[in-house]
Image: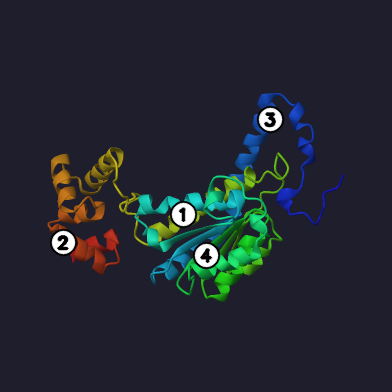
Amino acid sequence: MASDPKLPSTEQPDRRYDDLDSWAPQAILHAMWEGQLAAVAAVGPALPAIAAAAEACVEQLGRGGRLVYAGAGTSGRIGVQDGAELPPTFNWPEDRLVLLMAGGDVAFTRAVENAEDDVAAGAAAIAAHGVGANDVVIGIAASGSTPFTLSCLNAARAAGACTIAVANSANGAILRAAEFPVLVETGPEVIAGSTRMKAGTAQKVVLNLLSSLVMVRMGHVYRGRMVDMLARNEKLRRRAERMVMEITGAELEAVRAALVEAGGNVKSAVLVLEGLSGAEASAALARHGGNLRVTLAGLAR
C-alpha cells in the first residue's frame, strides 16, 4: 500500500516494520535504536536554523523578555522539560519563563483529549500571559500542524513576539507561521505515528541545543561551566566549590570562604578571590550584564 501524501511524514507507516511485532526482542530493539541514531543525525542539517533562532532569542531576551514554550502532547511535555531545567541550571528567572501546554497543567502528566485541537485556547493563552514584543515563543509540533501550537505562534507573532517553530514534517504550518522555522525531518516512525520516538528525540536535541546556546551567549556559562547554577543541595554545593577551584586555582578553604562571602554565587566567588568584596563582585557583574569573562577582563585593565 502506497503512503498517503496527505499525511505528515511523521504519521506515515514504514513498510520495513510491518512485521515488527513478530520479530525477536533484540531485533525490535535494534530497529528502534537505529531510529534514535537517525533522529539525532537528522538534527545536523538544522544547525544553521538553530543558530539563527538562538541569536534572535539573545537579542529579545536581552531586553528583558520572557521565554515561552508552547505545545501539545509529547511535544508540549518536551518543551516543558527543557524550560523547567533552565532556572536551576542557569539561574534563569522563573518569572521570565512561561510553559503553555494544550489542556493546561493537568496535561503535563496525562493526556487531555482534543486539547491539541483547541485553537481558541492557544490564542487565549498568549493573551492571558500578555506576550509581547520582547518575548520569545517556541512552538513545538512533530506534524507541524497542531492547531493549539499554531494558534499560539500566530497570536504571538501578531503581538510582536519573536517566534520559533520546531517541527519534524516539511509541510508543517507552524514552520510558515514562525519567523524562525527549524525543520528536522525524522520521517516515519518504527511504530507508525508514535512521535514520542524519533520525532521526540530530535525535538529534545533541538531544544537542548537552542536553549543551551542562548544561555552561553547570555553569559550564563564560563569556561564550559554552568557558573550561574543554583547550588540548592549538597551535590551542587560541592560542584560549585569544584568550579571555583578549577577556574581560580585556589585551595578549598579559600574557595569555601569566598562562596560564603559571595552568598553561594560562583561568579561572585571567583571575583572575591580576585580581591573584591561580595558586594563589589555583584556590582561589577551587574555592570557587565552578568558576564564573568567580560567582568574579569575589566578588572585586568
Percent of width and height locating residue 253: 13, 41
Quadrant into which the N terminus falls: top right
Label 3: element kind: helix
Q: Are marks 2 and 3 in contact (CB under 8 Å)?
A: no
Judge whether 132 appears above or below 145 on screen. Answer: below
The residue identified by callout 3 is: 28
Q: CA distance from mark 1 to mark 2?
A: 30 Å
The residue identified by callout 4 is: 137
Q: Residues within 10 Å of mark 4 (few under 14, many from 20)?
A: many
Q: Residues within 10 Å of mark 1 (few under 14, many from 20)?
A: many
Residue 180 visible here? no
Label 2: element kind: helix
**Residue at screen point 40% across, 63% down:** 96
Tell me the amino acid under the disc marked 3: Ile
Q: Disc 2 vs disc 3: which is toward the camera?
A: 2
**Residue at screen point 57% across, 75% down:** 158
Percent of width and height locating residue 135: 47, 69
- Res. 83 mark: 1
Q: CA distance from mark 4 to mark 1?
A: 12 Å
Q: Disc 1 vs disc 2: which is toward the camera?
A: 1
Quadrant into which the C terminus falls: bottom left
Label 1: element kind: helix
Label 4: element kind: strand
Q: Are marks 4 and 2 in contact (CB under 8 Å)?
A: no
Q: Earlier in the sequence, mark 4 or mark 2?
A: 4
Q: CA distance from mark 1 to mark 3?
A: 33 Å
Q: Earlier in the sequence, mark 1 or mark 3?
A: 3
From the viewer's perspective, is 144 left or right of 135? Answer: right
